[in-house]
């Protein structure tokens, strides 16, 4: 009886499965038929009109190609914006595992623009690397800021990044002794969570410190700067991803929490102006710097993408008219390579100077105008490896900021979905299910290891070049490959306008 019952049950299951399969096939045929009719009669797409149904495979393959190229077809040095070799270096540094290679590098040392460093013939014995020394920013502010770490976290807003990502960055930054820039989205509790030093950025919409008219609210700024962790204030004039363009925060992303932090209505689109409505000239910029510095007591500077440096010369002339104490305490120069913010492709790829031009141009103007020691230079723009950072220090930067480097340290796989709220690693999404993959405790350790390992390797380069600390690297310590495959010293490619500062 039991065998008969089991056989009957099995027959029923098979019949149901067969019926379900037939139904599914019928539905599939119906969908294909409807799709064929729609494709054949639509007028917007020539491929689908001529090849109904099967034309959809083309778009599927295009979509899948983004992923297959990364894993199966692209060579280690081919991908953009960061190739596999660069990403692997960051991943290994973040995991604190051995970062050596065998049998020679895959990097083409004859390719135009490749930097390498001039080692000293007799480096100091029994020293593997040199440590950075503190540098003071804002000597005329009531609360000058002394900071040793030359590699720090660049501007990334809460809202653009998820809460777990900001928390992990904050905790890792505190452990590594580096600063974290808030970006233009205001100061969130997650920035403060780890106890790291904070650079508060005032964007064109003045999120977090705005009044109802979109102008600076002094009281709100004082409340932000009352936090001991907030060490400096940065006025954002522009960013590399979209110079000259303000951002749009869709209403769907303006949650009650983000609205409270930014000081905007819940659920409504928020358009940032393309510049500060109260800063339209060098004089107004300097007035704003002086006002914020006097109000808060913090060092104050600005962030900009350079199209040329004529206006920097005019700025320097205005400084000498007003007095050296009126100068911005720092300038953050963002190369046009910047890219964490979603932006029109035309602006991201075709407007603004890349860092390899804008950084030396800025430093040379400050040297020529005898303001280099007064104004500290911070740079950002695709500096994610030790030799990128060492190049920037050789060119004259005091500090190097990185955004995407730290995103990679958090686990970013360069899926290029930052603007879609579908980030598979939970870094740039507010989808709680996807955020679950980002474990704050684990990723904060990776942020810490990435920063410390990178700075250690830059210290190794500096020691090999025979200097006492990384900021003593000069242009004569670095050579870059030209279009003929031969290298030239940065000191010849970008000669100093005045004798370089003593080491």
Image: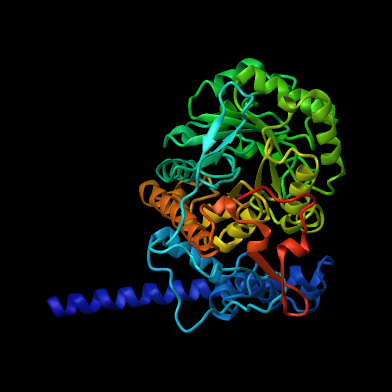
Residue 496 left/right relative to 202: right
Residue 180 left/right relative to 453: right
Q: Residue at x 75, y 56 (%)?
A: 354
Give coordinates of residue 496: x percent, y percent. Answer: 76, 54
Q: Residue at x 84, y 40 (%)?
A: 313
Q: Residue at x 73, y 58 (%)?
A: 356
Circle count: 0
Quadrant in which the N terminus is drawn: bottom left
Q: Residue at x 81, y 35 (%)?
A: 316
Residue reaching furthest to the front: 122
In-front residue for pair 125/367: 125
- Indicate the colouring scheme: rainbow
Image height of 410 relative to 187, above or below: below
Residue reaching furthest to the top: 219
Residue 503 left/right relative to 227: right
Give coordinates of residue 175: x percent, y percent. Answer: 40, 43
Give coordinates of residue 502: x percent, y percent. Answer: 64, 48
Residue 230 in view in this figure? yes
Quadrant in the rendering for residue 233: top right
Image height of 386 relative to 488, above or below: above
Image height of 20 relative to 162, above or below: below
In-front residue for pair 267/70: 70
Residue reaching furthest to the bottom: 103
In-front residue for pair 124/401: 124
In-front residue for pair 430/386: 386
Residue 255 in view in this figure? no
Residue 215 left/right relative to 197: right
């Amino acid at each position: 009886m039991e065998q008969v019952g089991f056989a009957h049950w099995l027959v029923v299951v098979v019949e149901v499965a067969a019926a379900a399969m037939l139904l599914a096939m019928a539905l599939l045929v119906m969908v294909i038929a409807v799709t064929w009719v729609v494709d054949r009669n639509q007028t917007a797409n020539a491929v689908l009109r001529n090849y109904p149904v099967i034309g959809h495979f083309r778009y599927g393959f295009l979509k899948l190609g983004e992923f297959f190229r990364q894993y199966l077809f692209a060579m280690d040095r081919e991908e953009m914006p960061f190739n596999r070799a660069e990403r692997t270096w960051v991943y290994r540094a973040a995991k604190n595992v051995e970062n050596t290679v065998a049998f020679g590098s895959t990097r083409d040392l004859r390719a135009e623009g490749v930097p390498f460093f001039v080692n000293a013939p007799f480096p100091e014995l029994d020293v593997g690397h040199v440590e950075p020394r503190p540098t003071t920013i804002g000597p005329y502010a009531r609360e000058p800021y002394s900071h040793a770490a030359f590699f720090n976290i660049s501007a990334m807003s809460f809202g653009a990044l998820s809460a777990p990502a900001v928390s992990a960055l904050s905790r890792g930054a505190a452990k590594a002794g580096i600063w974290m820039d808030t970006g233009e989205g205001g100061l969130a509790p997650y920035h403060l969570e780890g106890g790291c030093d904070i650079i508060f950025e005032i964007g064109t919409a003045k999120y977090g410190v705005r009044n109802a008219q979109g102008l600076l609210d002094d009281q709100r700024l004082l409340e932000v700067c009352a936090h001991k962790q907030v060490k400096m204030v940065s006025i954002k004039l522009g960013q590399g991803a979209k110079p000259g363009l303000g951002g749009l925060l869709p209403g769907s992303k303006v949650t009650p929490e983000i609205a409270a932090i930014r000081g905007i209505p819940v659920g409504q689109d928020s358009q940032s102006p393309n510049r500060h409505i109260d800063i339209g000239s060098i004089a107004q910029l300097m007035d704003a710097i002086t006002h914020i510095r006097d109000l808060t007591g913090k060092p104050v500077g600005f962030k900009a993408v350079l199209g040329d440096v004529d206006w920097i010369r005019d700025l320097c002339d205005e400084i000498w008219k007003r007095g050296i104490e009126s100068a911005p305490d720092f300038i953050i120069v963002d190369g046009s390579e910047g890219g964490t913010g979603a932006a029109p492709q035309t602006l991201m790829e075709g407007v603004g100077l890349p860092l390899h031009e804008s950084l030396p141009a800025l430093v040379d103007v400050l040297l020529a105008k005898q303001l280099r020691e007064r104004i500290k230079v911070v740079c950002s723009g695709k500096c994610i490896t030790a030799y990128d950072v060492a190049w920037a220090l050789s060119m004259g930067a005091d500090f190097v900021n990185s955004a995407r480097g730290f995103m990679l340290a958090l686990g970013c796989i360069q899926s290029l979905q930052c603007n879609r709220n579908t980030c598979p690693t939970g870094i740039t999404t507010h989808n709680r299910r996807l955020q679950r993959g980002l474990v704050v405790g684990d990723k904060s350790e990776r942020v810490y290891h990435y920063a410390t390992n990178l700075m250690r390797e830059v210290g190794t380069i500096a020691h090999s070049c025979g200097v006492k600390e990384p900021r003593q690297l000069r242009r004569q310590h670095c050579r870059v490959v030209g279009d003929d495959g031969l290298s030239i010293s940065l000191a010849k490619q970008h000669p100093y306008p005045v004798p370089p500062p003593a080491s």
